[in-house]
Image: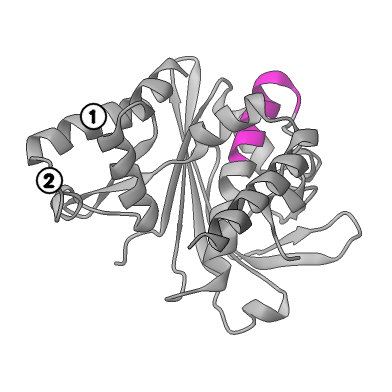
Amino acid sequence: MDEVFKALADASRRSLLDRLHARGGQTLNELCEGLAMTRQAVTKHLVILEAAHLVTAYKHGREKLHYLNPVPIHQIGERWIRKFERGKLAALSELKRQLEKRDE
Amino acid sequence: MSKPEFVYVTYIETTPEKLWEALTNSDFTERYWFGMRLRSDWKAGSTFKMVRSDGTVSDAGKIVEVDRPRRLAYTFINLSEKYKDELPALATFVIEPYGKLVKLTLTHEGFAEGSPFYSGISKGWPAILSSLKSLLETGQPLEIPRAALKFEN
């Protein structure tokens, strides 16, 4: 679990996860497109994300595709967010969403 | 060959045989799969059904590949009205032992462009796989209410 938190404690790595959440199954080239990071930096971040099992590399023909693997994040959520708190938290996040929408 | 829409991985402290049992025994699946009993004779070409606790069938498909305890693949689609125009997508479970751990890789592929079934599936699998891991490692599933995931049915 330490590895997951370490991997998540970096804005560049979180943005890579966001990109994979938006579109799963990207090659390294696709992931690098439009990013301010060098290819080497992206590769380095992917190694850390893969070690934490947050990203899965999947061989598809000759390509190596990257997928977001949300299972470890789900396990973190389950460890501290018990079932009885879920309803309250859902209500709170909905309230936050509604209030923030009004400011737009 | 199109690429899979989802690839999920989890490492579970168990044996391939126990994991296979957990994936195919309906008494087991009922405990971690939102109360669903998976019904099949687990032979290639056979029918596959997900049965709710009230006995109604929620999802149905066909068994595509069975190689106990290493590889299991089946197609399924939810039978509710809103998915009636969709074809069943293919879920493949690959089980690999790594010392004391077993790596479970789940790929899911063959969804139509903009498929509503796809968005439902993306909420379901992480919860099912986390609960499966918890059940095998601690004897207790995670109790995740369906409503928490905002499923509509």
Start-end of magenta stretch? B129-140
**Residue in the image at 31% along x and 31% along y:** A49
Specify whether A6 is left or right of A1: left
Residue A66 appears in the picture as rendered: yes
Residue B63 appears in the picture as rendered: no
Q: Is A28 or B45 nearer to us in this picture?
A: A28
Q: Is residue A55 above or below residue A2?
A: below
* Quadrant where the N terminus of chain B is found in the figure: bottom left
Q: Residue furthest bottom?
A: B85
Image location of residue A73, percent across then percent down: 50, 34
**Residue in the image at 12% along x and 45% along y:** A36
Helix or strand or loop: what does disc 1 sit on?
helix
Specify whether B68 is left or right of A55: right
Q: Amino acid at mark 1?
A: Val
**Residue in the image at 72% along x and 75% along y:** B80
Residue wearing tag 1: A47
Report which quarter residue B127 is drawn in.
Answer: top right
Q: Is B126 or A63 nearer to us in this picture?
A: B126
Label 1 crowd bin: few (<14), some (14–19), many (20+), radius 10 Å: some
Q: Residue furthest right?
A: B54
Q: CA distance from mark 2 to mark 1?
A: 18 Å
Tag nearer the camera, 2 or 1: 2
- Inspect the magenta stretch and tell me whether residue B134 lies in it: yes
**Residue in the image at 61% along x and 49% along y:** A96
Image location of residue A53, percent across then percent down: 39, 31
Image location of residue B32, percent across then percent down: 73, 39
Q: Is residue B34 above or below residue B132?
A: below
Q: Is A76 or B19 nearer to us in this picture?
A: A76
Q: Chain of mark 1?
A: A
Choose the circle earlier in sequence order: 2 or 1. Answer: 2
Residue wearing tag 2: A36
